Image (cartoon, grey):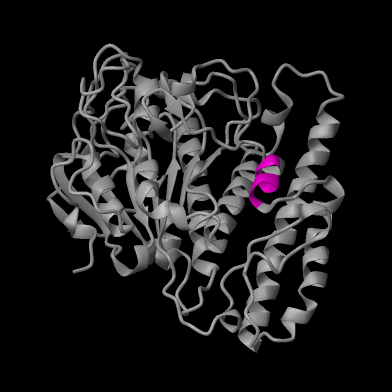
Amino acid sequence: MKSHSRRSFLRGIGGTSLSLPFLESLSAASVTPATRLAIFYVPIGVVRRGFFPGEGHTAIPKFSSNQVAIKGREEIAIGRHGLPTTPTLEPLQAVKEHVTLLTGMGRAYQEGTDVHAQCGSCFLSSATPYSVKESPYPLDRTLDQVIADQVGRETPFRTLEFSCNSHQDNKESIFFDNISWYGTDHVAPSMRDPRKAYQRLFGTQEVEAYQNITDLVLEDAKVLEKQLGARDREKFGEYYESIRTIELQMERLEKMRSELTTISVEEPAAARLPRGEYIRLMGDLMVVALQTGLTRIATFMVGPERWDTPFTFDGLFDKPMSHHKMSHNQDKFIEQLQEVDRFHMEQYVYLIDKMASIREKDGSTLLDNTIFTYGSGLGDGATHQYSDLPIIVAGRGGGVIKPQGHHHLSDGTPLANLWLTQAQAMGAKLERFADSSGMVTPIMRT
């Protein structure tokens, strides 16, 4: 069979090009699917009594500007437990065979810097406090960039950074709004607009070109398609149907933006778009980028830290609400906050399901070959604690990770231990990362 390049054979009009998933008919050799890494960051922490097992009856905490741990929670034995069915975690039951809730991990807080800015910007660096002299934040090169130094050169994009902060008001500094950093004070800019992200990822130059991108690419691929086996033709069709779905979603979002520009409203127009649809669309773009090999490493920030501009959260409330302001008044907004936490969890589960539905060349799924971590830099939005962080790991990382339901680690286990474990699972040769003290061996398949 004539040799084909996965990326060079797709040449559409106006510079249009798309990356294809691996098709068996295009390669004589069998290649093991690459391992991917994705981070799903949730801002403002969570309502602990709705998220964590053993804390459902703890007192609703009062706001504190300092680090104050929640008291009164039940003691949990170190080791493996069943996945809890707390109100926030209940959506995970649908994908429980794919996930592990990890409890007991935390980070060290460096005094003298804003709690929210540090918890987000330093989430993936976990540098030892006061070890970074050039910045008031313990902010160093983040996990995604460190891993990409060793495994990111094989893909068009070393890393990809996605953000679901659609606001244009720029209320806070970059430290509140970015979790990926090339180094101290050197941010890795994130993509926030679905259309611009699509153009960047798939090489589309003109509106007319990408509106009909599927038709153009399939026309170019007619000759090749005749050489594909039945399984590849099916995969080929499924892949481009997913691209068409994303295009239709973006057209709908663009239409809504155009309509909103004619209406005089105080809230930025983009913030009035359906929040869940926006998050899922950005997530779809991330999943396609991982699926097609555009990158192996992606970060996904669901929202910014301490950003008081409100969201409607897909009709959860009858008026836009500020996640941050509510978190400082848990006694008044406890039910609304738990609805937001569950809303974010549902978006995470949506992406887990999406990854689990995508078949790779060897019969495994994209999720089987991905480490997909949900987490926040705060253990609670009212107490601002850096201990007992909410962390969930989905996927099997190519067989290195084993889902366990719930595993409670020793209290105070450094979050960097998880980052070191994931770096090694990705093939990065690291003996230590930041303030790590070892590996999280319970989640590793022996």
- Residue 86 shows in the view: no
Q: Is residue 175 left or right of residue 63?
A: right
Q: Position of residue 376 (x, y in %)?
A: 37, 36
**Quarter of image, res 127:** top left
Q: Residue at x 70, y 74 (%)?
A: 237
Image quarter of the C terminus: bottom left
Which one is in front, 264 or 284? Answer: 284
Q: Position of residue 175 (x, y in %)?
A: 44, 22
Residue at the top extreme, as displayed: 112
> Height in image: 322 above or below 443?
above
> Height in image: 292 above or below 185?
below
Image quarter of the N terminus: bottom right
Q: Residue at x 83, y 26 (%)?
A: 261
Q: Residue at x 82, y 64 (%)?
A: 216
Q: Is residue 293 left or right of residue 2?
A: left
Q: Which residues are magenta?
A: 196-201
Which one is in front, 30 or 412? Answer: 30
Q: Is residue 173 left or right of residue 404?
A: right
Whether residue 75 appears in magenta in the rendering, the answer is no
